[in-house]
């Protein structure tokens, strides 16, 4: 048994070291999470347990027994199984059963001390790795302290006892579903737990209670959905919606300005033949295609539909088309905005080519960051005009 505890201790140090190194060298994606359904994030565990027992009768009786947990008269092997659920990445509950071979320490003879027992505990678990460092589904080592309470039964002596316990669970991730457990636990039980009553006369909260120290090694298997999804980025959604609203407002402003220009042009025309020219002027008015902040992907495909009439006029007259890209000067550096405006212009050019426009008839300009329109989001666009 002494060899077992020594091996477990060495395994704890070496595996924890490897897990810490892996956690430091492999970048992890930490993020806020959304609430999962009740049936998500359940787990089951199975462990081999090495337990050392300490009885209240050891004090004030002159037994003078060695305190080492490696002594055969006070330790024994057992097993444990558990089922639990994580309600958040940092908070969970676990129901745990363990037993079944124990010791009632009344002498230094392990055969005399032998008994059979079981213990059932309900435990609250705190994943400090997630609580302190943020949730990461690829983290190798999770440090999980816990505390709980339950009941124990000594089957050899037919006694029951309440207990309180605490411990530290180390989980080492093998994959999304499976992890290795290294669990260190301490339980304080009523004096009746070992079946020996009225033997000892010391006072004090620990000396008058039975105690257990346990080292457990085993596996955790995650049931169903084992990870946590990213929480929706509300601000990003709001920004996207606002960008779309701004784009519509900018289109409306362009249309209103063009209507005023056309009204003025019509008012100056005296000849009926100029009516056809007026229609061409309306069709040939510059059209804006809008983009979201920092992006070169068209925000709304409706903008491309608005370009089609202008394209038809240009193709019918074999006219040159000028595509000018813009960015807003309030976002990004000058060099970034220059590149972004060029990308936006080229995005629109590619759409024009798909519509049948000869690329040789397209002139591309990149204006960089500007603040000519208000609000500033109106400047995140590319304009299409007949030269």
Image: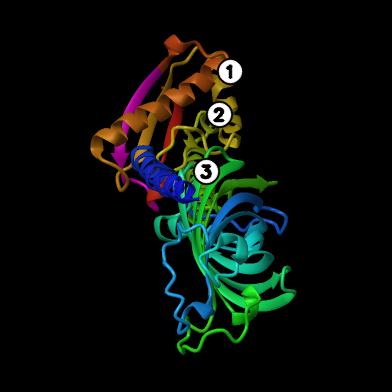
Q: Earlier in the sequence, mark 3 or mark 2?
A: 3
Q: Is the residue under label 1 in contact with that under label 2 (CB below 8 Å)?
A: yes
Quarter of the picture containing the C terminus is: top left
What number is the disc on residue 265? none
- Could you tell whether 54 is left or right of 115 in the image? left
Residue 378 appears at what percent x and percent y? 42, 46
Identify the residue position indicated by label 1 in the image: 355
Identify the residue position indicated by label 2 in the image: 307
Mark 3 or mark 2: which is in front?
2
Q: Earlier in the sequence, mark 2 or mark 1?
A: 2
Judging from the image, the colouring scheme is rainbow
Give the image quarter of residue 293.
top left
Asked if the stretch drawn in magenta spans residue 21, the answer is no
Name which residue lies at 41% across and 23% down.
322
User: Closer to the camera, 16 or 241?
Assistant: 16
Q: CA distance from mark 3 to mark 2?
A: 13 Å
Magenta residues (range): 363-375
Q: CA distance from mark 2 to mark 1?
A: 10 Å
Q: Secondary structure at mark 3?
A: helix
User: Closer to the camera, 316 or 287?
Assistant: 287
What number is the disc on residue 255? 3
Give the image quarter of residue 26.
top left
Q: Earlier in the sequence, mark 3 or mark 1?
A: 3
- Relative to residue 200, is residue 102 depicted above or below? above
Q: CA distance from mark 3 to mark 1?
A: 23 Å
Q: Main secondary structure of the magenta part?
A: strand
Outermost residue on the left side: it is 334
Residue 54 appears at what percent x and percent y? 51, 71
Res 330 seen here: yes
Q: Secondary structure at mark 1?
A: loop
């Amino acid at each position: 048994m002494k060899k077992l505890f020594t091996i477990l201790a060495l395994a704890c140090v070496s595996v924890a070291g490897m897990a810490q190194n892996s956690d430091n060298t492999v970048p992890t994606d930490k993020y806020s999470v959304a609430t999962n359904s009740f049936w998500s994030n359940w787990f089951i565990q199975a462990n081999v347990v090495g337990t050392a027992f300490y009885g209240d009768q050891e004090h004030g009786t002159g037994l003078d027994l060695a305190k080492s947990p490696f002594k055969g008269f006070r330790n024994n092997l057992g097993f444990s199984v558990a089922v639990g659920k994580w309600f958040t990445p940092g908070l969970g509950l676990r129901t745990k059963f363990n037993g079944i071979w124990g010791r009632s320490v009344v002498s230094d003879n392990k055969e005399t001390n032998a008994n059979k027992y079981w213990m059932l505990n309900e435990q609250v678990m705190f994943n400090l790795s997630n609580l302190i460092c943020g949730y990461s589904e690829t983290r190798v080592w999770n440090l999980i302290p816990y505390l709980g309470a339950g009941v124990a039964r000594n089957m050899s002596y037919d006694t029951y006892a309440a207990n309180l316990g605490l411990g530290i669970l180390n989980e080492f991730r093998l994959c999304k579903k499976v992890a290795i457990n290294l669990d260190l636990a301490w339980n304080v039980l009523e004096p009746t737990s070992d079946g020996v009553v009225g033997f000892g006369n010391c006072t004090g909260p620990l000396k008058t209670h039975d105690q257990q120290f346990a080292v457990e090694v085993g596996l955790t298997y995650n049931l169903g959905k084992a990870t946590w999804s990213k929480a929706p980025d509300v601000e990003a959604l709001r920004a996207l919606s606002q960008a779309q609203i701004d784009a519509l407002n900018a289109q409306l402003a362009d249309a209103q300005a063009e209507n005023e220009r056309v009204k003025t042009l019509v008012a100056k025309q005296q000849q009926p033949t100029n009516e056809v020219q007026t229609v061409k002027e309306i069709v040939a008015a510059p059209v804006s295609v809008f983009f979201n902040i920092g992006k070169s992907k068209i925000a709304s495909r409706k903008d491309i539909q608005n370009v089609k009439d202008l394209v038809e006029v240009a193709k019918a007259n074999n006219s040159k088309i000028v595509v000018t890209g813009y960015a807003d000067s309030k976002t990004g550096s000058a060099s970034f905005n220059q590149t972004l405006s060029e990308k936006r212009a080229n995005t629109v050019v590619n759409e024009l080519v798909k519509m049948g426009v000869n690329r040789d008839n397209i002139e591309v300009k990149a204006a960089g960051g500007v603040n000519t329109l208000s609000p500033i989001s109106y400047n995140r666009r590319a304009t299409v005009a007949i030269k």
